[in-house]
Amino acid sequence: MVSNIYFLTDSYEYFEVAKAIRNFTYFESSTHPELITRRPFLYPFFLSFFVDFNPLIVIVVQTILSLFNTFILFKIIKQYNIQLTNKLLLLFLFTPSIFIYAQLIMSEWLVMLFLTMLFWLLSQKWTKNNFAYIQIITVLLAFTKPIFYPFIYINSIFFLVYMLKNKVFSFWLFLPIICLQFYLNHNENLTGYRHFSSIENKNLIDYNLYYFKSSTQSKKKADLWLDSVYKDNRYVGKNFAEQNIYLKQMATNEIKKNLFRYSFYHFYTAVRGIFDPGRYDLITFFEKENGRQGFLEVLNSDKSIWSLFKNKVAFVYLLLIPIFLINCMKWFYVIKCLIFNKLTLNMYYLIVLFAYYILVSGPVNCSRYMMPFQGIVIVFAVLGMQYKSKSLNQKASKC
């Protein structure tokens, strides 16, 4: 509510899906299938209650729910016997993305809420109820952000091994897989193409491979390649299913041709993204998004780094240096915490989820993508600062 800018480009798409849900046309085949399947329904469902209201009402509700997220986070902090010191306050203050995305009509704050709840559950003792809640949250994450849906398979394998090892069982293990298959079948019936989100193949072409070619060749060559992809006869005039089969084939062939170079680039850019101080977040908080405000536009093209400093919001750059340095410090202590503490299987699950998310993000990883995990990062960073050789669960007062 500090900023009067509530919309990014994606926000309008969320609202269009919300209108389809509100008008009960979401499941109709006549509704634009590419748009409907691009954004999973959970956040648009939340927005559907506010379609006819001023966007400020949405921001107020989001802010209240974000405060609830903070409440859970502080319960976790208290559970790990972490003192509320100036260091902890500093880490929060210099992680502005947490506050910025609560003020935008975007789903990041909701993902953060689910991840914080997941962290809370994983820090508790094993119970069948807690396991059921973990599976429900796994489903909710996938239906909020498409990047989480492949993790459903990893989740199933992880807990299947856990159950075999500990000789326990719960039918809740099958919930995420069943929900995923129902949704994949629904999208296939709607569009003729089996997929979770229509954004998958376009992102591979428009971002991952485009940035790869811009970085390894030149922006001009990348533009020509991208233009040729969408002017190809196999794309122009084709239906949704045919277009996506073609885009997936093009992306797969390009990655196969440059497997080693692309794999290295993908890994490098994924890790690089965790240190992004969030110039894009800060700029779009003060002025309307134009699509060219972030570091990705510089790092993945032939722009000069000095082009960043031509923006009229010059004071933002004064904030970026301490944010970047504190971000580096956070990750140093996170790594220290994970290396020197004895980790329980529950914490390994969280680490696997974190590693999966970073690696899958690849070239588009940035401050915005990392924002939902920032609460967890801060807790682990403080634990790293207060390092004592104990199991992480032993540090929790209830475990």
Image (tube, rainbow, N blue to C red):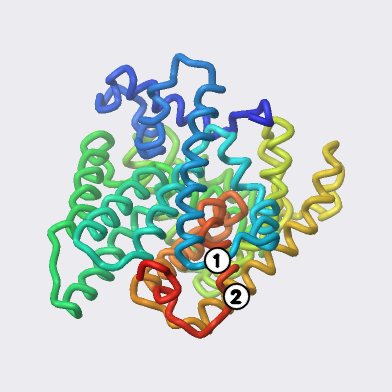
Residue 258 appears left or right of 20: right
Q: Where's residue 334, x and y in %?
A: 57, 72
As drawn, 293 above or below 325: above
Residue 301: which quarter of the image?
bottom right
In front of the other: 225 or 127: 127
Residue 386: mark: 2
Residue at 70% x, 41% y: name it.
292
Residue at 49% x, 54% y: name it.
73
In front of the other: 168 or 74: 74
Count of picture labels: 2
Residue 82: mark: 1
Quadrant (top left/top right/bottom left/bottom right) for the C terminus = bottom left
Residue 328: which quarter of the image?
bottom right
- Circle nearer the N terminus (2, 1): 1
Q: Amino acid at mark 1?
A: Ile
Residue at 42% x, 69% y: name it.
396
Q: Where's residue 94, x and y in %?
A: 70, 54
Q: Where's residue 234, x and y in %?
A: 41, 43
Q: Is residue 70 visible?
A: yes
In front of the other: 4 or 145: 4
Quadrant (top left/top right/bottom left/bottom right) for the N terminus = top right
Residue at 51% x, 46% y: name it.
229
Helix, strand or loop at disc 2?
loop
* Distance of label 2 from label 1 (alpha carbons): 8 Å
Tag 2 and tag 1, C-beta contact below 8 Å: yes
Q: Amino acid at mark 2?
A: Gln
Q: Where's residue 180, x and y in %?
A: 25, 49
As drawn, 329 above or below 279: below
As drawn, 31 above or below 326: above
Helix, strand or loop at disc 1?
loop
Q: Is residue 220 visible?
A: no
Residue 187: mark: none
